[in-house]
Amino acid sequence: MSSSFDPGPYLAAGIRLSEARRWWGWRLSAAQALAWRLAGVADPARATQWATAGVTPDTVADCRAAGLSAAEALLWHEYEFDVGEALTARRQGHTPAQAFDLVRGRKPQRQDDPDPFSSLMAFTGGGDPQDGTQRFLARAARADALVMYGYISESWTDDEAVAWARQNIDAPTARMWQDFGLRPHEARRYLRRGLTPMAVARAWWQAGIPFDEAASWAGAGLSPQEATEQRARGVTAEQAETLRALRDD
């Protein structure tokens, strides 16, 4: 696309000037904007989400009919499933993480299954209700017992610690993901795929993505290669943060 905004093609496609600037800002051509709008996607950021997940204006209706949102489509994309595979696995009742385990011959994990030992240890009665450790144990009740003890041993029992423990991420590893800039649920997706903080950081470094931008692109659901391509087209880290926020909505 041209580096300067030319409203002509957008106006010819029936797109108002104010809207045209938004589509151009996301580096989507007039033809692409028209196709997405005709498919019922009026927000260029949302269209970019769908496109990143491998969904096109021609296939987005099938995704919506199946109840697949753009954010979930991105999650399937992160777990290396194309749209067709994602829709099939969803019909079988699998989450992306469970389907990923099945493909690799592992027994799928159920995140809502409490660990019996953890449930026993995470007592909620007795003791001082104002005690930070007591509150941490009560709120992180589904986490593995050893994971919880790791946080307690580091005297890290605040709200942030609870969020990381609930993802069953041990305290030292959580600190590394924090340094990279990821949030607990984002880090968990990488861990479920067998990736360590160092491996993820190395991949983004090798792709040439600035360190202070990497978490924004990663949290948005893009791979290092996809982020590189988007940056080359003129999409900014601030826009990546917008995509990241859309996933959390």
Image: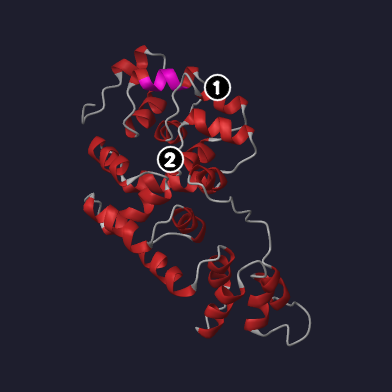
Asked if 221 appears above or below 169 in the picture, the reply is above
| Secondary structure beneath label 2 | loop
Q: Residue 135, image x and y in percent? A: 67, 78
In the current view of this chain or complex, which residue is farthest to the top?
12
Residue beneath label 2, please?
80
Q: Give the range drawn in magenta.
A: 32-36
Residue 51 visible within the image? yes
Residue at point 73%, 83% (across, down): 129
Residue beneath label 1, please?
61
| CB atoms of marks 1 and 2 within 8 Å | no
Quadrant of the drawing holding the N terminus: top left
Q: Could you say which quadrant of the image residue 240 lies in?
A: top left
Colour mapping:
secondary structure
Q: Residue 23, image x and y in percent? A: 37, 29
Between label 1 and label 2, give the one nearer the viewer: 2
Q: What residue type is labelled 2?
A: Glu
**Nearest to the observer: residue 139 or residue 94:** 94
What numbered label is drawn on residue 121? none
Q: Separation of disc 1 and disc 2 at Cα? A: 21 Å
Asked if 177 appears above or below 215 in the picture, the reply is below
